[in-house]
Amino acid sequence: MLADDLLTGLNPEQAEAVRSSEGPLLVLAGAGSGKTRVLTQRIAWLVGVNGLAPESLLAVTFTNKAAGEMRERVEKLLGMDARGVWLSTFHSSCVRILRREIEALGRERNFVIYDEADSRAAVKQALARHELPASAADARRMRWQIDQWKNRGQDPEQARSERDDLYTRRAAEVYESYQRLLREANALDFGDLLLLTVELFDRHPEVLTAYRERWQYLLVDEYQDTNRVQYRLVKQLAGGHRNLCVVGDPDQSIYAWRGADIKNILDFERDFPDAKVVKLERNYRSTQRILSASTAVINNNTGRPQKNMITDRGDGEKLILYEARDDRDEAQYVVRDIMEAALQGRSLGQCAVFYRTNAQSRTFEEELLKYDVPYVVVGGVRFYDRAEVKDALAWLRVLLNPADNQALRRIVNRPPRGIGKTTIARADALSDACRGSLLEAMRLLLQRGEAGRAASKVRAFIALLDELAAELPELGPADALARVLERSGYQPALEKERTPESEARLENLRELLTGAEDFEDANANEASDERSPCARFLDQVSLVSDVDTANFDEQRVSLMTVHAAKGLEFELVWLVGMEEGLFPLHATESDTEQMEEERRLCYVGMTRAMEKLCLCYALERRRYGSHSFSAPSRFLSELPREELEVKGVRRAPALPGSHVADGERRYDYSFEQHAEDAGAEGAGGIAAGVRVRHRIYGAGTVLKVEGKGPRQKLSVRFDHAGVKKLVLRYANLELI
DNA sequence: AGTGTACTTTTTTTT
DNA sequence: AAAGTACACT
C-alpha cells in the first residue's frame, strides 16, 4: 500500500490526522469536515503503511451503523485485512470482553442484557420491596436516577454519600435492591456493561494488561458523547502505550442527559499534555449560507473552543423561515415543498424532516399518506421493542438463561394458559424466600403441591420449557424462534385472531425470522466463539438502535428526531417545530447548561443540510390533546437576517417586544397578536403551555384549562410540586 | 382467571 | 388523543 495513495485528496489537516500514528491525538472535527474519511484512512494507514497487525487496533464508534459503515470503507481500502480490526460500539465491545472474562468477577458468562423495559420492571419490584409507591411514573423516574448514577460510575454506596437527604438515601436503597435483583436474574443493564468492564480492569490488572497488549492503537469516535465510565475505560486501555486518537466536536455534544460529559473532550489536552491537536475546519457538506447561519446560532454558546468553519460549496439559496398557523399547516407546507422538490427532479431519499420529539412525526405521516408520498420514520418505537418481538425473544432468553425473571414474566401467560397473577404472586414470594429464580420457585411450588388449581397448567408450562430447552442447542436462531412460536401456541393464537393488529404482529414476527436468518448467514463462518448462535443473536439484537436498522431508501422521505439525525446528511432539510417550549424544550428553560445543549442540538440539525434548509414554527399546536400557543424559538432570533427568506401566514415580520433583549442585529419574530388570541381561551392570557408562578408551589406549566368564568379551573404541573388543580380566581397566579 | 371499563399518563432526546 | 394501567366484574 502506498502512503501517497492514502493521502491524495486530503487537505493538510486531514492528512496530518491520518499520518500522526504515535501518541495521543485529538481531532476536532467540525460538522461535515470529512471525519469518517479521516478515521478510515487512518486505520488503513496504520495497517497498510505502518504494517501493524489489524488485530492490534480497536476502533469504537457510537452506533452500530457507524461501525458498519466504517468497516465497509476500511474493507475497500484494505481488503481481507480489515476483518481483524476490532470495530464496534462501546457497549458491544464490553459485552464481548465480559463474555470472556466476567467469571473473574464471580459472575456467570451466560448473563442476559436487560433493556429499558426489563430494567424498569426490576426497578418496580425493588420499589415494592421497600414499600415505596411503584407507579409506572415512579419506576421510570427511579430508573433514570439509577442510570445517572451508573453513568457517573457510582455504586449504591457512593450514591448515598453524595448527598444526605431522605430522597437520596431511599433512592440509594432502591438502587441496591435493584442491583441485587439483577444479579439474581444473572442480568446486566446497559450501564452495567460499561461499569463491570471498568471494574474488571481495576480489580484484575493482569486482564487489563492482556487487552492493552492486544490493542496497541485506540480510536474513539464521537468522543464528545462519552460519559464518565467510558472515559475511564478509554484511559485504562490507553494507559500503557498511549496511542489514543479521539475524534469529536464539542459543538455536537447532545447526550449530556444520558450522562455524556463534554469535559472529556474539552479536557483532553489537560489529560494528555503532550497531545497533538488537529482541527478540521473545512466543511465539505453545506453551502456558505447554511454554514453561516448555523455558526451564528452556535456562537451564542459560551466556553467553546473557537472554530472557523469554511466551505467552498458556494453561497447557495437563502434559508427559508416558515411561520405556520398550526401544526397541520406546518406539515402541509413541508409536504408540498417536498413534492415540489420531487417534481424538480430531487430524489425523495435526499429529503429529511427533523423534529425535537417523536410525537411530532404523526402530523407529517398523515400528510404524507394523504398525498401518497413514501416515507420512513426512523426511531420512535424500535422494531425490537415491539411487544410481539420482545415476547418471541423472551422465550429464547429464558431457555438460555433460566434465571431471567423478567423474560419469564413476559411469557409465562402469553398466550393465556391459565397461570395468572395468583400463581405468579405465590412463586414470587417463594423465590424471595429461598433466593432462587422465579422458575425454580415454580418448580418448587409444584413439588410442594402448593400450586393450587393451576398445578396442571404450571406442570405443562415447565414441561414445554424443558422440551424446548432440550432441542435448542442444535438450532440456529431462526429455527429456534420458529419452533418456539409454534410450540408455545403464540403464533397459532395470533393467526386465529384475524384482526389488522394481529396481521401486523405476524408480519413483524416474520421480519424477525428473516433477521435471524440473515444473522445466521452472516455468521455462518464464525465458529470461533463457543457460545451458541442463539446467544450471540440475542446479544446483537439487544444492542441495536433504530438508526442501525433503518434502510434509507433512495425513494423515501426520512422523518426523525434531531438526535437520530446526528452523523447523517441530506440535500434538503426541514427543521420543524421551532418554538419556545418545544425546541428548546421548556424543561430546559431555567438551566443554562441544558439550554446550551438544546442549542447544540439545533446546530446538529442545521448542519445536516447540504443545499436547502427550511426552518418552521407554528403559532398554535395541539399538545397532549389540547391547544397551546407558543412563541417562536429563541434560536430563530439568533439567525442572521440577511440569510433568510421569511414565508408564512403572517408575512409581516418584526413587531416590537420580543423576548430577546438586544434587538439590534437580531430579528424579532414577535408574538403579540397571538397572545391576544390566547387570552380568549383563558382569562388573563392563561392557556395550556403557559408558564405561571404560584405563591406556594412556585413555577409551573399550565396543562389544561377547564370551564369558563369565575369557576374556571386549571391543571398546572409545578416544577417541584407535581400536578395540582387550581381555581383560577383564587390561585393568584402570576404569569412568567 | 380472564375480560371490560375507567382512569392516568404521556412528549425529550437512547446505547 | 392515544395508550397503558389498575381495578372491578363475571
Image (cartoon, coloured by chain):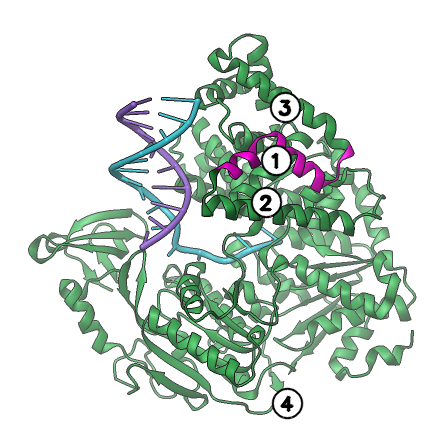
Chain colours: A green, B cyan, C purple
Residue under label 2: A509
Q: Which residues are magenta?
A: A474-496
Residue under label 3: A464
Q: Chain of mark 1?
A: A
Residue under label 1: A485
Marks 2 and 1 in Cβ contact (< 8 Å)? yes
Q: Is residue A491 magenta?
A: yes
Q: Does residue A89 sit above or below A448 in this rendering? A: below
Q: Is residue A680 left or right of residue A46?
A: left
Q: Amino acid at mark 3?
A: Leu
Residue under label 4: A312
Q: Nearer the viewer, residue B2 or A733?
A: B2
Q: Amino acid at mark 2?
A: Leu
Quadrant showing the N terminus of chain A: bottom right
Marks 2 and 4 in Cβ contact (< 8 Å)? no
| Precedes in sequence: disc 1 or disc 4 | 4
Q: CA distance from mark 2 to mark 4?
A: 49 Å
Q: Is residue A215 visible?
A: yes
| Precedes in sequence: disc 2 or disc 1 | 1
Q: Residues within 10 Å of mark 2 (few under 14, many from 20)?
A: many
Q: Chain of mark 2?
A: A
